[in-house]
C-alpha cells in the first residue's frame, strides 16, 4: 500500500486537486471529475435551499385551516415549484452528480471519467436548465404540479409551462450524459484486477441508476417537447379536439418519472451499503444479491409506471398487472434491507455520524417502502389516491431515503473530498435532529391522508389542524437539521482538523489515496487483488499493491 | 504522454481503451436516441390503431415518389459515410474528406426534397392548426396524422441538420489529416450517428407513406 503523506518530506504542502490551480477559470473550465463534482455540490445545494424555502412557505400556510398567507393560485405555484426544483434539480442529480462523479473513478482506480469534457458540459446543461427554471420562477412560475398533466398544461394554464419545460428538457440531457459517462467509465476504465464482483456496491448502485437515466430520460424529454410544441402551435399529440389522449401523456410521463424515483433511491442505497459495511467492520452480507438487487430494481422499475394511473381511466386489467408488478419491486428492495440488517448482526458497530444517517435511512426507507406496497394494492390506492398519504409515502422514500443517504454519504466522504474533518458533536446532533424532525413532519401526514385530507389545497377542514401543526413544527426542526451541516461543513473547509487518508479505517480504493486526492487520483496506478469489504482490515493485508 | 502517443487523452492507458470507450459511448447515446424517438412511435402506434381509416386517408396525401426518392438518397449517403469511415481507418484523410462532403450533399438533397413536400402540405392546408382543412370524414383525426407526420419527420430533419453540420466539421478535420488509424474515433462516432438517422427514416417511410395505402 502506498499513500503519500499530506505534506512532502521537506515540509512543503502536497499538490492535490484543490490546490493544483487557482482562480475562477480553473474551476469553470476544469475537466477534473472531482472539481466538477464540487461545482455540482454548490449548484444542487442552491436548488435544495430554494426548494426547501418553498416547503417552508407551504408548511407555514398549512399551519392553520384557513388560507392566510397565499391565494390558491400562489399556493399552486409554490407546491409546483417545490416539486420541480427538488425532483429535477436536486434529487435526480444529487447523489450521482456529486458523490458518484467524485467517487466512481476513485473507487474503480481510474484517472477520470471516460469523457471529462462531456462531464463538464453536463454541468453547464444542468446550470442552463436551472437558470431557465429560475427565470420562469421569477416571472410567475408554473402551477400545473410538477407532473404537467395535459390538457391542463397544454390548453388551460397561462403560466410559464414552456420555459420550465425547456429548462427540464435541457437538464434532462445533463442527466443522460452523466449516466452515459458512468456506464462507459464502469465498463472501460476499471483498474487491473477490478472485476465486476470486486466493485463497491456504491458503483453497482450507480450503474443501475445510469441505466434508468439512459433509458428513461429521453422519453420524458420527447414528452416535454411535445407539450412545448402543443403550447406553441396550439395543436398537438395530446389535444383532445383532434382525438388526442391525455392518458397517453400520463403513460409517457410516468414511464420516466416512476423510474426516476429509483434514480433518486438507488445511489442512496449504494451509499448505505458502503456505510453499513464500514461501520460494522464486516463484509456486506450477500454481496451479489445486493448488487443484482440494484439491477433488479432498475429493470422492474420500468414495468410499474401504471400504478400512478389506477384511477386515471386505465383498464382494470392493466391496473391489476401494474399492481402485481409494483409489489414485485418490494422483493429486491427487501433483499437490500435484510442484507444490511444481516451485515449489522454481530458486527462491531461504531456510531460515527455517517452510520447514524445510514441507520436512519434503513428505518425510514422501510416505512416508505412498505407503504409503497400498500399503495400498490388497487383498493387502498383508490381510497388514498391524491391524499396526504401519498405525500407522506414518497417523502419517506425521497427525503427519508434519498436525502438521508446523500447526507450520510457527504459526511462519510467529506474528509476525502476536502481533506478536513467536521465537528463530531454537531454532526451527530444534526443526524438526530434530521431524523426526529423528519418523522414529526411526515408521519402525521400518513394519518391525515388516511383520514382523507386531499393534497394540493391551501386550506382544510379544522379537524385536521392538530396533525398539520405537528407537521409544520416538525418541518421547522427538519429545516434546522439541514442548516447545521451547511454551517459546519462550510466551517470545516477552513478550520476543520486535517483528515488522514483513511479516517474510518475503510476498505476501498478511494481510501488508499491521499485526502484530498491528487489531480490524477493515484500516485501509482492501483492494482486490485481482493474482493471489496475484506473486513476486518488486518494491518498486514494490504488491499492494494502498487506496480 | 502526449509527445509519444499523439491523440491519446491523459486519462486513458491505451488507444484501444480510448477507442472502446468512444464506441461504447456512442452506442449508448444512440440507445437514448431510440427512446427519444420511441415516445413518438408509441403515440403513432396508439393513434394508428385508434383511427385507422383517418390515418389511411392522411397517408394518401403524401407523395410516395418523393418519399421513395429520398429513401434512396439517404441509403446512398450511408454508403458514402461508411466508405468515409473506412478511409479514415486506413489513413486516407483526403479521400474520407471528399466522401464526407458527398454525404453532406446527399443529406442536403434529402432536406430540400423534404422542404418541397412540406411546402406542398402548406399549399393544401394540411399544416395542423386553425387553418387545417381536409375534405372527408374524420378530418380531426386526419389532423392528428399530420401532427404526427410533422413531429416525426421534423424531429428527423432536425437530426439531419445536426448530422450535416457534424459531417462538415469532420470533413474539415479529415482533410487536415486529424484522423489516424489509431484514433479516428470521432469520425466513426459521426458515422454511427449518421447511420442511425438514416435508419430512423427507414422506419418512418413505411409507417407514414406505405402502410394501408392499398
Image: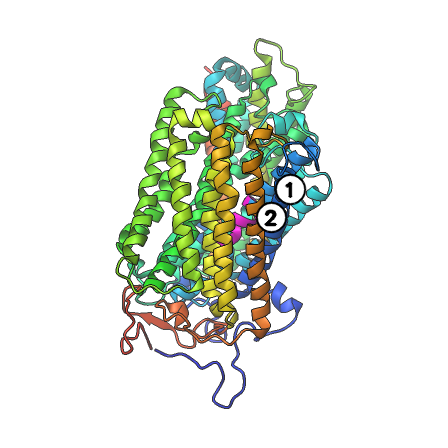
Seen from the viewer's position, the closer of residues A134 and B196 is A134
Q: Is residue B43 above or below residue A442?
A: above
Q: Is residue B87 magenta?
A: no
Chain identity of mark 1? A
Q: Which residue is mark 1?
A: A60
Per the picture, the main secondary structure of the magenta-coloured stretch is helix
Neighbourhood count class around disc 1 (C-alpha, 10 Å): few under 14, some 14–19, many 20 upward: some
Q: Residue at x 49, y 86 (%)?
A: A8
Q: Residue A257: x, y in percent?
A: 49, 38
Instruction: Provide the secondary structure element on which disc 2 rests.
Output: helix
Q: Is residue A522 above or below residue B107?
A: below
The segment highlighted magenta reads: A87-95
Q: Which residue is mark 2?
A: A52
Q: Residue B63: x, y in percent?
A: 56, 22
Seen from the viewer's position, the closer of residues B15 and A39 is A39
Q: Is residue A439 above or below residue A185?
A: above
Amino acid at each position: 500500500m502506498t499513500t503519500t503523506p499530506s505534506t512532502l518530506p521537506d515540509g512543503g504542502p502536497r499538490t492535490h486537486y484543490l490546490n493544483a490551480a487557482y482562480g475562477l477559470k480553473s474551476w469553470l473550465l476544469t475537466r477534473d471529475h472531482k472539481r466538477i463534482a464540487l461545482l455540482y455540490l454548490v449548484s444542487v445545494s442552491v436548488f435544495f435551499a430554494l426548494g426547501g424555502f418553498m416547503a417552508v412557505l407551504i408548511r407555514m400556510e398549512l399551519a392553520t385551516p384557513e388560507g392566510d398567507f397565499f391565494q390558491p393560485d400562489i399556493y399552486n405555484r409554490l407546491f409546483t415549484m417545490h416539486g420541480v426544483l427538488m425532483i429535477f434539480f436536486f434529487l435526480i442529480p444529487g447523489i450521482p452528480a456529486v458523490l458518484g462523479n467524485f467517487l466512481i473513478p476513485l473507487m474503480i482506480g481510474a484517472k477520470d471519467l471516460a469523457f471529462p469534457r462531456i462531464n463538464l458540459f453536463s454541468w453547464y446543461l444542468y446550470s442552463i436548465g436551472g437558470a431557465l427554471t429560475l427565470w420562469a420562477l421569477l416571472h410567475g412560475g408554473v402551477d400545473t404540479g410538477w407532473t404537467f398533466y395535459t390538457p391542463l398544461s397544454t390548453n388551460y394554464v397561462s403560466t410559464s409551462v414552456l420555459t420550465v419545460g425547456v429548462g427540464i428538457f435541457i437538464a434532462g440531457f445533463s442527466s443522460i450524459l452523466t449516466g452515459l459517462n458512468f456506464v462507459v467509465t464502469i465498463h472501460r476504465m476499471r483498474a487491473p484486477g477490478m472485476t465486476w464482483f470486486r466493485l463497491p456496491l456504491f458503483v453497482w448502485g450507480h450503474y443501475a441508476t445510469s441505466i434508468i437515466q439512459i433509458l428513461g430520460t429521453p422519453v420524458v424529454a420527447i414528452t416535454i417537447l411535445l407539450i412545448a410544441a402543443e403550447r406553441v402551435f396550439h395543436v398537438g399529440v395530446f389535444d383532445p379536439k383532434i382525438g388526442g389522449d391525455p392518458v397517453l401523456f400520463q403513460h409517457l410521463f410516468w414511464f420516466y418519472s416512476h423510474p426516476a424515483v429509483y434514480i433518486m433511491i438507488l445511489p442512496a442505497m449504494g451509499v448505505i451499503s458502503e456505510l453499513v459495511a464500514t461501520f460494522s467492520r464486516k463484509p456486506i452480507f450477500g454481496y451479489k444479491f445486493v448488487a443484482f438487487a440494484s439491477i433488479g430494481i432498475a429493470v422492474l422499475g420500468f414495468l410499474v409506471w401504471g400504478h400512478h394511473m389506477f384511477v386515471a381511466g386505465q383498464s382494470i386489467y392493466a391496473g391489476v398487472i401494474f399492481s402485481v408488478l409494483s409489489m414485485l419491486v418490494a422483493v429486491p428492495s427487501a433483499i437490500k434491507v435484510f442484507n444490511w440488517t444481516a451485515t449489522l448482526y454481530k458486527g462491531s458497530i461504531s456510531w460515527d455520524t455517517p452510520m447514524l444517517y445510514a441507520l436512519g435511512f434503513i428505518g425510514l426507507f422501510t416505512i416508505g417502502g412498505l407503504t409503497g406496497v400498500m399503495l400498490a394494492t388497487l383498493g387502498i390506492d383508490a381510497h388514498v389516491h391524491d391524499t396526504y398519504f401519498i405525500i407522506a409515502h414518497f417523502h419517506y422514500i425521497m427525503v427519508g431515503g434519498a436525502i438521508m443517504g446523500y447526507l450520510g454519504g457527504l459526511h462519510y466522504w467529506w474528509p476525502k473530498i476536502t481533506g478536513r474533518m467536521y465537528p463530531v458533536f454537531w454532526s451527530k446532533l444534526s443526524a438526530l435532529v434530521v431524523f426526529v424532525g423528519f418523522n414529526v413532519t411526515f408521519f402525521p401526514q400518513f394519518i391525515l391522508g388516511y383520514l382523507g385530507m386531499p393534497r394540493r389545497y391551501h386550506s382544510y377542514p379544522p379537524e385536521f389542524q392538530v396533525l398539520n401543526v405537528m407537521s409544520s413544527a416538525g418541518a421547522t426542526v427538519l429545516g434546522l437539521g439541514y442548516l447545521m451541516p451547511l454551517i459546519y461543513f462550510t466551517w470545516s473547509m477552513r478550520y476543520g482538523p486535517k483528515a488522514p487518508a483513511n479516517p474510518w479505517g475503510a476498505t476501498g480504493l478511494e481510501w488508499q489515496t491521499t485526502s484530498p486526492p491528487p489531480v490524477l487520483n493515484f500516485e501509482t496506478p492501483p492494482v486490485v487483488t481482493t474482493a471489496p469489504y475484506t473486513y476486518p482490515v488486518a494491518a498486514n493485508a494490504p488491499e492494494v499493491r502498487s506496480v | 504522454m502526449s509527445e509519444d502517443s499523439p491523440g491519446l487523452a491523459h486519462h486513458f492507458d491505451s488507444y484501444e481503451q480510448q477507442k472502446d470507450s468512444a464506441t461504447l459511448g456512442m452506442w449508448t447515446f444512440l440507445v437514448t436516441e431510440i427512446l427519444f424517438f420511441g415516445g413518438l412511435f408509441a403515440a403513432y402506434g396508439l393513434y394508428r390503431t385508434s383511427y385507422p381509416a383517418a390515418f389511411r386517408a392522411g397517408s394518401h396525401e403524401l407523395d410516395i415518389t418523393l418519399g421513395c426518392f429520398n429513401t434512396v438518397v439517404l441509403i446512398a449517403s450511408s454508403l458514402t459515410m461508411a466508405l468515409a469511415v473506412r478511409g479514415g481507418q486506413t489513413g486516407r484523410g483526403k479521400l474520407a474528406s471528399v466522401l464526407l462532403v458527398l454525404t453532406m450533399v446527399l443529406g442536403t438533397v434529402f432536406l430540400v426534397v423534404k422542404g418541397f413536400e412540406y411546402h406542398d402540405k402548406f399549399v393544401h392546408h394540411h399544416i395542423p392548426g386553425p387553418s387545417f382543412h381536409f375534405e372527408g370524414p374524420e378530418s380531426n383525426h386526419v389532423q392528428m396524422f399530420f401532427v404526427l407526420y410533422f413531429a416525426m419527420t421534423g424531429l428527423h430533419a432536425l437530426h439531419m441538420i445536426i448530422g450535416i453540420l457534424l459531417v462538415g466539421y469532420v470533413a474539415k478535420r479529415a482533410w487536415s489529416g486529424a484522423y489516424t488509424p489509431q484514433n479516428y474515433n470521432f469520425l466513426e462516432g459521426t458515422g454511427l450517428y449518421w447511420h442511425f438517422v438514416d435508419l430512423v427514416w427507414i422506419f418512418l417511410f413505411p409507417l407514414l407513406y406505405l402502410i394501408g395505402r392499398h
